[in-house]
Amino acid sequence: MREDLLHFIWKYKKLKLTDLITTKGERLLLLDFGTHNHLAGPDFFNAKIDIEGQLWAGNVEMHLKSSDWYAHHHEEDDNYNNVILHVVWEDDVEVFRNDNSTIPTLELCKYISLQLLQSYQKLFEKKDVGFINCEKDLKEVDGFLVNSWLERLYFERLEDKADFIFELLKKSNNDWEQVLFTMLLKTFGLKINGASFLSLGAAMEFPVFRKQRENIFQMESLLFGMAHLLEENEVLDEHYIQLKKEFAYQKKKYGLKNESVLKPQFFKLRPPNFPTIRLSQLANLYALHSSLFQKVISASSLDEMYLLFKVSASTYWYTHYTFGKESKKSSKKLTSKFIDLLIVNVILPLQFCYAKYQGKECNEHISNIISNIKREENTVIRNFKVHGLSASNAQESQSLLQLYNFYCTQNKCLQCAIGTNLLS
C-alpha cells in the first residue's frame, strides 16, 4: 500500500460516493474533491464537504495511518490548520488542529472495491517483471491515450531541462552566450565527460574564451589547459609544447583557475569521443561563427541546424586522437548523429527557454523539428519496443526516456496516464 494510491482514489473518485461516514459516525457528503497539490502543504486544496448538514470548505490531507499526521509533524505547521478532512487507509489515532478541535477522519479502506485493489496489486507485483511494472499489459492500452501522454511527456522533459537552463542563466547574470557555451560543453562531453566539461564551463567565463575566437590555437589551448590536458611532462610533441606555453601565458593574463575542473576521462570511450577531439571541434565551431547564440536561436529548420554544426577538429587532430601519438588520417567531423544529439539537447531546449523568457510560445516549431529527427537507440528504447511501445522519431524516444526515468523506475505508476488507465 502506497500513499499515492489514496491520491489516485480521491482524484479519480474511485471510492463509493454514497453512505459515507466519518470514524465518529458522522454522515459525510463530498461536494468537491478539491485540486491535487503536488507541492508542500495539504494534498488537496479547496475541497467542499458536508458533515451532518454543515458545509465545510478547505483542504484535505491523506495518510496511510492517522498517526502519520504526527510522524510528519503537521501539528507544528500552520499550513495544516485549515484541513477539513483527514483521509486515511487505517485510523489508528485521533488527530487535532492547533485549537484542539478534532479533524474529521474518513477511513478509506471501507469504501474501496476489491477489483481496484486486485488491479493495484497486479500493477505493482514484481514477479516475472524484467523491465517495468506494466510491461505485460502495455499492449492493451489505447494507442491514442499513449500518444497523447507521450507528447505531454516530451514537453515535461523540456520543462525539466528549462529549469537547468534558467539556473545557468541566473548564475551567468543573464548571459545567454555563456549559457549556450556551458550547454554545448556538457553535451560535447557526452555521458562520461559531461560533468567534467560542465565544470569547465563553470570555471571559465565565456568572454575570455570569446576574445580568442580569431585564433583557434589559442581557443584550444584554453580548453585543453583548463581541462587539465596539458599537464604531462613526458609528451615531447611540439604542438603539445606550444599549447602548454600558450595556456601558461593565458592563465596568468586572465587570472584563470581550474582547480574545480574535473579532469576528463578517456577510458571506455571510442576514439572519436575522446575529450581532445570534442574540445577541438567545439573550438572550431566558435571560430566559424561569430554570433553563435543568435544563429542557434534563429535556426528554423533542420537543414539550418545541420549546416550550423558542419565543423571538424583542427588539422593536428586529422592524424591524432591524443597528444604525441599519430593515427590513421581522418577529418574528425561532427557526424549527423552527434548533431542530432546537439539539436535535441541544446538547440531546441534553448529555443524553448528563450521563447519562454520573451513571453512567447514555440511548441509547434519544436515539435516539427524533433519529429523529423531519428529516434535514439539505447537499451531503454529497445526494451519499450519489445513490449509493444515503439518510438518512430526523437520526440517519442525522448518521451519514453522521460517516462522510464521519472515514472517507471520510481514506481510513479499512479501519476502516469498508462498506469491510471490500467487501474480504471
Image: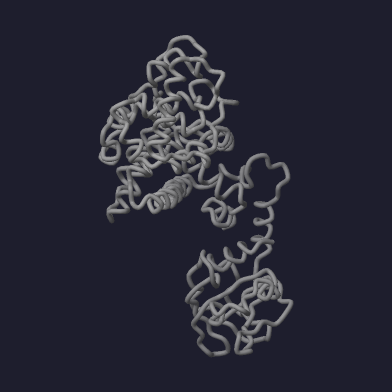
Colour scheme of the rendered structure: one colour
Q: Is residue 76 left or right of residue 180?
A: right
Would you identify the image quadrant in which residue 244 lies?
Answer: top left
Relative side of 336 to 322, left or right: left
In the picture, residue 75 is in which quadrant?
bottom right
When asked about the image quadrant of residue 223, the answer is top left
Residue at point 47%, 9% (across, down): 328
In the rendering, at what x and y percent does residue 124 appear?
67, 52
238 to 19, vertically: above or below: above
Seen from this angle, which residue lies furthest top? 328
Residue 120 position, x and y percent, is 65, 57
x%, y% of residue 337?
42, 27
Query: Is residue 300 at least partly visible in the picture?
Result: no
Q: Does 2 sit above or below residue 372?
A: below
Residue found at x 39% / y 21%: 313
Quarter of the image where the C terminus is located: bottom right
Quadrant where the N terminus sits is bottom right
Residue at (36% x, 27% y) in the render: 218
Q: In the rendered picture of this protein, how many numbered marks are placed on residues?
A: 0
Q: Looking at the image, which is closer to me, 53 or 302? A: 302
Is 209 on the left-hand or right-hand side of 121?
A: left
Which of the two residues, 111 or 229, is positioned nearer the viewer here? 229
At horizontal 73% and vertical 45% (from top left) the residue drawn is 127
- Relative to 284, say whether 119 is above or below: below
Residue 230 in picture, x, y percent from top left? 50, 26
